[in-house]
Amino acid sequence: MDKNNLLNRITIDPNIFGGKPIIRGMRIKVENILALLEQGVTIEDILNDYPDLEIDDIRACIAYARTLVANETIENIAMEIELRH
């Protein structure tokens, strides 16, 4: 599946989680799936814990994150983190 088709799986609905990105209109936030991956949870375990998800949904979360940071630099990210503290 190409990147655009993957990204079509990510939706934003102001009535769900205040407009945070979700997967295919379900009440599953992209950030939650990314956090699970960050923690080392396997894709297989995520799919078992979220039976409505498909492998391409997880790939879509990764593609979404990659798209967001594609034009960022480490310096910009570090500065943003520093400003938050």
Image (cartoon, helix red, strand yellow):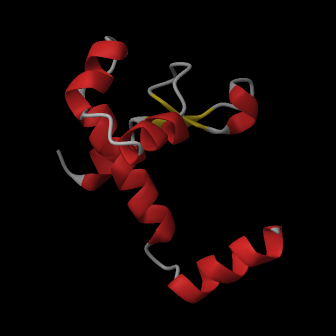
Depth check: give the residue in front, 50 or 68.
Answer: 50
Q: Residue at x 32, y 34 (%)?
A: 41
Residue ranking furthest to the bottom: 75
Q: Residue at x 69, y 24 (%)?
A: 16
Q: How far from the left and from the top, in percent, is residue 72? A: 52, 79
Q: How far from the left and from the top, in percent, is residue 75? A: 59, 88
> In the image, is 77 to the left or to the right of 61?
right
Q: How far from the left and from the top, in percent, is residue 37? A: 36, 42
Q: How far from the left and from the top, in percent, is residue 5? A: 29, 44
> In the image, is 53 to the left or to the right of 29?
left
Residue ranking furthest to the left: 1
- Give the answer, above or below, for where 45 lies relative to 63: above
Q: Report the number of discs.
A: 0
Position of the C terminus, as image quadrant, is: bottom right
- Give the answer, above or below, for where 41 lies relative to 85: above
- Splitting the image into 4 quarters, where does residue 9 fall? top left
Q: Residue at x 39, y 41 (%)?
A: 8
Q: Residue at x 61, y 77 (%)?
A: 77
Position of the N terminus, as image quadrant, is: top left
> In the image, is 54 to the left or to the right of 21?
left
> In the image, is 69 to the left or to the right of 52?
right
- Give the answer, above or below, for where 13 lies relative to 40: above
Depth check: give the residue in front, 45 or 55.
Answer: 45
